[in-house]
Image (cartoon, helix red, strand yellow):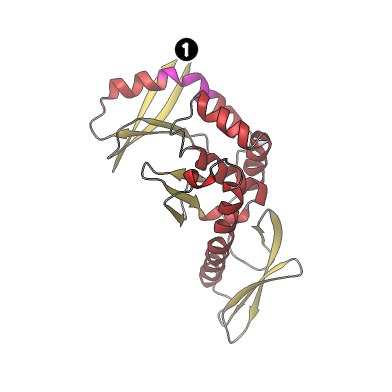
Amino acid sequence: MTADVHRLEYGKQEIVYRVVRRPRATLEIAVEPDASVVVAAPMDAPLEAIEAKLKKRAAWVMRQQRYFSQFLPRTPERRYIAGETHLYLGRQYRLKVVLHVQETVKLLRGFIVVQTHRPNRAEITRELVDTWYRQRAHIKFPERLEACLGRFPNSETFRPKGLIIRQIKQRWGSMSPSGRLLLNLRLIQAPVDAIDYVITHELCHMAEPHHGPAFFELLEKVMPDWERRKHRLERAMA
């Protein structure tokens, strides 16, 4: 996989975008939460074809960039020290680091309590919290997937062939051409209705691979309030 940066003039505006080449058959344009633009392209796609597709979608790209820009700058990276706030399922919890012979993490009366015999090692606290988030995600995401599948008629035709949970920098989720659902581990910090939005959005791609009118017609049908949920997701996770 390779990536390079290009610029496209659109009226008086300029769109800076990254091209990521992958072994795929079609072009896909995405505007990420940091307002950056990424084009996933086949390995042999000429730059002229990529620019032509981007020009057709330029108005949409700029609308998306304006939407995400309202949430910038995003929250600084956490330092994993006592008293810092962290999110779980949309609620804020204070981090409490306690000296203990065992290393565990648990929720207790508004706190994420980290028990560790190395309480002054922030990197150890981070590893423990990240592991706890991952464990919770592997429980919660399959539950929400089942709930979201229930929104669709003939739900089994929308069932993905697999669920992958991974820490990724940009997207909240994606659906691979082979039907595998990828969810960002960070979603475990988001409100449940926002998690459901991401999952439902990606399940719609089982029937409609691209963000065309048919895709949004399906999304609107199965989740009429998707725009409110999307806004809540970006606001909560900014």
Q: Is residue 159 above or below residue 228?
A: below
The quadrant in which the C terminus is found is top right
Give how far across and how far down residue 171 sits, in percent: 49, 43
Give whichever of 178, 63 is nearer the camera: 178
Does residue 75 show up? Answer: no
Would you say 181 lies left or right of 226 here?
left
Q: Tell me where the magenta segment starts and ends, as one range.
A: 55-62
Label 1 environment density (alpha carbons within 10 Å; few <14, some 14–19, many ≥20):
few
Residue at the spot 57% in from the left edge and 53% down from the top edge: 146
Give how far across and how far down residue 157 sits, in percent: 47, 44
Give how far across and how far down residue 168 sits, in percent: 46, 51
Identify residue type, mark 1.
Gly
Residue receiving disc 1:
11
Residue 183 lies in the magenta stretch: no
Would you say 211 lies left or right of 19 here?
right
Magenta region, main secondary structure: helix
Give whichever of 73, 52 is nearer the camera: 52
Give whichever of 210, 15 is nearer the camera: 210
**Number of numbered labels in the structure image:** 1
The quadrant in which the N terminus is found is top left
Dividing the picture into quarters, in which one does residue 3 lie? Answer: top left
Would you say 181 lies left or right of 191 here?
left
Q: Residue furthest front?
A: 154
Give how far across and how far down residue 38 sits, in percent: 41, 34
Q: Is residue 105 above or below residue 215?
A: below
Does residue 143 show up? Answer: yes
Residue at the spot 51% in from the left edge and 42% down from the top edge: 203
Q: Label 1's element?
A: loop
Q: Residue furthest bottom?
A: 101
Dividing the picture into quarters, in which one does residue 49 lie? Answer: top left
